[in-house]
Amino acid sequence: MRNFTWSFLMFFCFVFTSFSQTKTVEKGTYLSANKGQNIKLNLLENNKYELVFYSGDYKIKGDSVLFTPIDKFESGFDLAFKNDKKAKKVKIKFINPSFYSFFIGSQNGSNEVKYQRLSDIWSQENTDNASPDAEFEIDRADYLYLVCEDYKGESKISKFALPKEVSEVTINYQPDLFGDLNIVGFFNKNTNELMVSERPGKDPLVFVNEKDALPERMSKVVPLEIKSIVNWTYPGKEIAESEVYAVVDSAATAADSSFVLEKYDFKLKVENNLKSALSATKESKTKFQVVVIDSKNASAKTDFEAAVKDQETQLAYTMYDSYHPEYDLYNYYLTTAEDKKWLKTNKITDTPVIVILDSNGEILASAKASLKEKQYHFNYYDDFYKKLQRTSGLLAFNKTVKNKKSNDTDFIQAFNKLAVLETPYDYDVESAADENPAEFKFVSTVLDKKEVAQIWKKLIETHQKDTKPNMYLVETILKEIKNQGFSKQFFSEDRVLNDTDFLSIDYLIKHYDAIDTERLTFNVKEGETHSIGSLNTEIALALQQNQYVYENDALAEKKNDKTIAVYKKLINAGKGNFECYQNYFTYLAEVVDTDGSNTNYLKEFTTYFKTNLATDKGSAIEKLDEMFASIDPNSQYSYNGWNSFKEYHSNLCNSAAWTVVSKPGNNGFMKSAIGWSEYSLAVTKNNPYYLDTLAQLYYKDGQKEKAVQTQLLATKYLNSDVAEETASEIRETLTKMQNGTY
C-alpha cells in the first residue's frame, strides 16, 4: 500500500463555556470587580462575546507572533494613604490576606530593613478572628516593604516610599492571574489558522457592567523598586521544610541553615567624555555606544543617571550570579558642552536625541526621544540589537568594497560578519521612523547585487586551491547555502543554489575531514560566536531546502544533476550518514527518470539497505539500535526518539517497495522489493499497509497463494486508523486475487 505519514501536533486551546442571556443581562463591556479592572468581558451583538484577560504589544516574526505584556513589572499591591502629622504611629490595614504568604518590612534611611511575617502580627492583633482584614500599627518609617512569597519559594519584594505625614496605609493585593505569561502565536499557512498557546487561569472572575458604579479603587502607588528572589529570607525568619531546595554540607548547615541569593552588582560602562566612551566601545568589539543629547533639559544629567541606574538594575537580575557578557550590549554616554564640534559635524541640532554608534564611531541609528522613552530597546531580548548588527555589517561591507586595498581576508571577514548574524524578521527598519520621528531611523546602505555576486564567486574560485580550509569561509558558505547568510541580510530574498554555491560545496567536501577536526575548536573561539555542525548534515539540509521550481525543464534537470552529484560525492567519500541518506531519498523519490521509472532512487536505496539494514548479520531491531546510537544528537530523530526512528525506517522500506508495485518500469527490483517489504513488517508487525504492499509484490512475483494469505492478514488487521477508502481498496484487492482478476 502507498506510503503514509503520521504527524504529531501538540497544541493548547482555550475552552469557554456559553453565557446564557437573561432579561437582566445587557450587551456591553463588563469589568472584573475582584481580579483587577484590566480584565474585560465584552457581550457583543449576535450573541457573541470576547473575554479579554491580557493586553500588551506584539511582534510578527515570520510565521510567529510574540506577545509582550504592557504592565510586566506591576507589584500586585495597591496602596492608599491617609495623612495626619499628629499621628505618632502608622496604622496598617491589609485587606483579606488569608490566601497568600505575606511579609511586611519597614526601613528608615539606609538602615537594615526589619521584617515580620504578616500572619504572626495578625494572630497577635486579631485574637477573636472576627475580621478577615489584618489591622495593626507600626512605627513611622521612610520606606515600606511588602513581600509575597509563592509556593515555589520565589518572593516578589516591592519597596514603597511612605509620605512624611502618613497616618494610615490601606493595602490590597491583586495577584497576577497568569504570572509571567509567555504567550506565543503561530500562523499555519496550510490552514490559514493562527494558533495561540497560554497557561489558563484557575480562579473564577466576577464582572460588573462598566456603566454601573464600580467599588472605589485605591489610587495607584508605584513602588520604588520590585525584586523577585528565590528562597528569600531575613534574620530570624523560620525556614519551612518545603523551602529547602538543595543538599548542603552538614558543617555549613550547622552554622547557617539558610542562604540568600543575591543579585550581581553590575555597573554599565559610562565615560565622562566622548573619546573615552568610543575607545571603551571599540575595545569591547560586540557593544554599541548609546549617545544621549539632551542639552536643553535642566535635569538631563539626573534623568540620564536614573535611566542608566534602571538599566543596571534590570541587567543585574538577568545576570543574577556573575558577569554574563551576552547581556551587556551597550555603553552609555551623555553629551556635554565639550561635544559641540562632534554634534556640528554630524548635523545634530534637535534635543532630546539618542544616537547609536558602532565601535568605529559610525552613526547607525537615531531617534528624537529621551533615553527613558527608548530604554526598553536596550535589552537582550529586543530585536533592536540585531538590526544594529545588520546595519553595522552593511556599512562595513560597503567600505570594504570601496576600499581598493581590500584583500581576500578583508572580504571573507566582511561576508562572515553578516552571514553569522541571526536573520531579522523585520527588514523595513526605516518606515516607522518616516512616520514617527520618535522611532529610530537606521542608516541605509545600498549594495549592487551583481557586484556582490561577482566578489563572492571570485573568492570561492580563488580558494579552490587552498591546502587547508579557511574556517571563516567555511562558516560563511554553510550559512549561504542554507539561505541564512549574507544574501539574506543584504537583499532580504529567498534564493536557490547557483553554480557558485555548488562550487562552494565542493570546497567543503574537499576539506571535509580537516573541517570536521577543526570545527569544535573554532566554535568555542574566545571572544567570538560560531556554530558549525556536522558537515554531511549541514550540506544535506541545504540541499533539502533547495526545493524550488525553476522556470524551465532544462534548468530543473541541471539542478537535479548537480544535487544528485553532491549526494554521491558525500556517499562515495564515506560521509553518507543517516541524515544525508534521509534527505537524499526524499529528493530522489520526487525525481522521475525519463522512462517513467525511479531507477536512480531504487539503486541508491538498494545500496543503503544492504549497507545499513540487511538482517543477514543480526536482527533488524539490533541493527537499527546501533544506527540510532550514532546519529547526530541535534537531528530531529534524536529529539523524537527511538520509536520515531524505527517507524521512519519501516515506512521508508515500505515506500521503496510500493514504488515497485505501482510502476511497471521498476519490475527489475521485484526480488529486492520483497526483501524491503518483509523488513518493514519485521520492524512494525501486523501493519495493514505494509501487508498489502507485500501481498501485491508476492502476486506480481508469481507467488499467488502466498499473496492471498498475506492479503487476508491485511484485511484482518484493518482498524479505525485506516481510511475507509483505503480499507475498501485492500478488500477489493483481496477479491481480485482470489478470483484471478488482479
Image (tube, grey):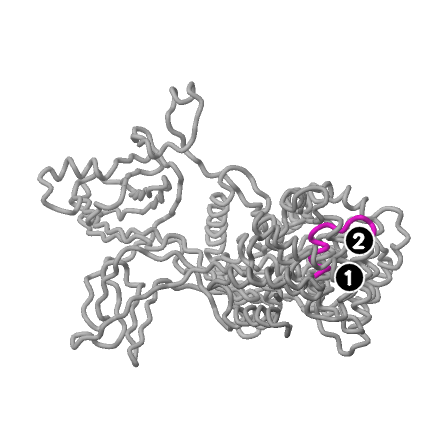
Circle 2 is placed at which residue position? 570
Q: Quadrant of the C terminus?
A: bottom right
Q: In this rendered view, identify the residue nearer to me: 599 or 577.
A: 599
Q: Residue furthest bottom?
A: 46
For mark 1, does the 10 Å Cα neighbourhood hold few (<14), some (14 to 19), or many (20 or more) residues? few
- Read off the magenta span: 571-585
Amino acid identity at mark 1: Lys
Asked which secondary structure carries label 1, the reply is: helix
For mark 2, does the 10 Å Cα neighbourhood hold few (<14), some (14 to 19), or many (20 or more) residues? many
Q: Residue 501, image x and y in percent?
A: 80, 62
> What residue lies at 28% left-to-right and 40% top-to-bottom?
103
Res. 284 in view: no
Between discs 2 and 1, the one toward the N terminus: 1
Asked which secondary structure carries label 2, the reply is: helix
Q: Residue 641, image x and y in percent?
A: 57, 48
Tell me the quarter of the picture where residue 389 sits.
bottom right
Which label sits on residue 156? none
Amino acid identity at mark 2: Leu
Residue 613 versus residue 351 in the image, above or below: above
Circle 1 is placed at which residue position? 399
